[in-house]
Each structure stands twice: as structure tokens, then as C-alpha cells.
Image (spheres, rainbow, N blue to C red):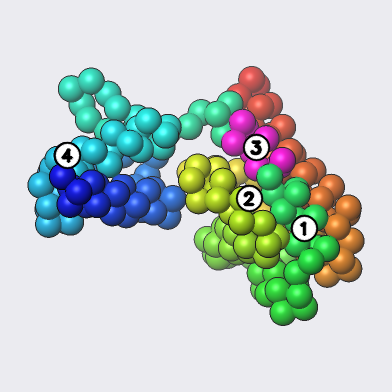
Amino acid sequence: MSIRRTIVSVEVYQEIKKALFDGTWPAGARLDRKQLAERFGISQTPVNDALNRLTGEGLLESRLHDGFFVPDYSDIELADLFAVRAGLESIAARLCADTCDEKARRTISACFAAFKKGIVDGQQAAYLQADRSFHTLILEYSGSSRLNEVEAVFGIACRSYEHGLIRSPAETLPEHLAIVDAIGRKDGRAAQLAMAEHLLATRAFLLVKATG
């Protein structure tokens, strides 16, 4: 393999991975190798290298004679993602509460400012975006490069949004606001517990749904 091919494969891998984490393709979608090659203006060889690497990381599924597909996670699989998130993000929330500056606390608080009087019809998409931004900021402001590296490599939080909101905003908004409040008060223990309970409640919901 030439050095140039290796570089191109890595660049394509990074671009496709970013698109996966951004939700460019819906769950179960088939990735067209020819279209991807045309999009990047390259041959299919580095595209295949990138797709095989993503498959090895569990971010894509390879089906014999059919190609590569975005995983469509079951409720059980999603529940497992939320269990991992609870471990990682509860620590991130504690670090965030203990160490982030006032500007960061205000940014976090602003995530749900538009919804403090409740969620009205037509705001679900905006709430979903606020939800995603909030959890991203918690990791970012934790100050832990390793926690952020885990998310960058595995996309655990990104993958858990595959089917959008799992529980209703009416249920999760008070939980989010409790985390915001704990961070604002610089109460790391309370922030850690509130985040863990928030994400584990979604895990429990998914497990009940899967077995009910």
C-alpha cells in the first residue's frame, strides 16, 4: 500500500465516521461505495479500506454480497449504550461541576432556557438538538481529554441518538434541569448522581420496552 493511499483512506475514514456520528444516514441505510467514491473524487479502493475499518470498529455492518449498512440498533443494544454513557457522562458531569468556569456554566444553562416553561407542539426537534448539545458540552467542559477521546473514537452518545428522543421531553426536561442546577451550584456529587440517574432511567425504559 502506498503512503498516499494510506493517507486518502484515513481521510475518507474520518469523513465517513463524522457523517455517521452526525446522523447523515438513517439507521439501516446502505452506503453506496460508488457514490462515496464519486463524492470524494477518488477510486473505490480507499473507500473500501475506510468502510472495512469502520466495520471492524462496529460502526458499520457488512453483509455478504450486499455491502455496508448503518446499524439499526435494537432496544437492548441501545440500552447497553446508555449504560456506558451513564458511566462516562456521570463522571464528566462531576468534573464539569467541580472545574468549569462561569462562562461554561452559563453556556450549559442556556441549553434548555427556551423550554423552562415546558415543551409545546413543534418544539420536539429543537429539544432534541438542545439535548445533544447539552451532553456534548458536558463532555467538552469536563476538561478530560480521555473522556472526549472515547466519544470521538466510539461515538457512544452519537449512536444512542439513532432513533431520536427515546423518552418524552416532559419526562427528561426536569432531569436535565436538575443536572444544570447541580453544575451551577458547583455540586459535583449531585451532578454526577443526577446524570447517572437520567441516563440509567432511559436504559431502564428501553429494557422494559424490549421485554414488554
Please, what is the three-letter code of the amino acid marked with disc 1?
A: Leu
Query: Regarding mark 4 in the picture, which secondary structure is present there?
Result: loop
Give the spatial CA distance, label 3 vs label 4: 37 Å
Give the spatial CA distance, label 1 vs label 2: 11 Å
Q: Earlier in the sequence, mark 3 or mark 2?
A: 3
Evaluate if marks 1 and 2 touch, with contact meaning CB atoms under 8 Å apart. Answer: yes
What residue does disc 4 label?
1
The image quadrant of residue 141 is bottom right
Q: Nearer the viewer, mark 3 or mark 4?
A: 4
Left or right relative to 95: residue 85: left
- Tell me the quarter of the image containing the C terminus: top right
Q: Residue at x 79, y 66 (%)?
A: 99
Please, what is the three-letter code of the amino acid marked with disc 4?
A: Met
Q: Earlier in the sequence, mark 2 or mark 4?
A: 4
What residue does disc 3 label?
84
Q: Earlier in the sequence, mark 1 or mark 4?
A: 4
Q: Earlier in the sequence, mark 1 or mark 3?
A: 3
What residue does disc 2 label?
147
Range shown magenta: 79-87
Q: Residue at x 23, y 46 (%)?
A: 6
Please, what is the three-letter code of the amino acid marked with disc 3?
A: Val
Give the spatial CA distance, label 1 vs label 3: 17 Å
Please, what is the three-letter code of the amino acid marked with disc 2?
A: Leu
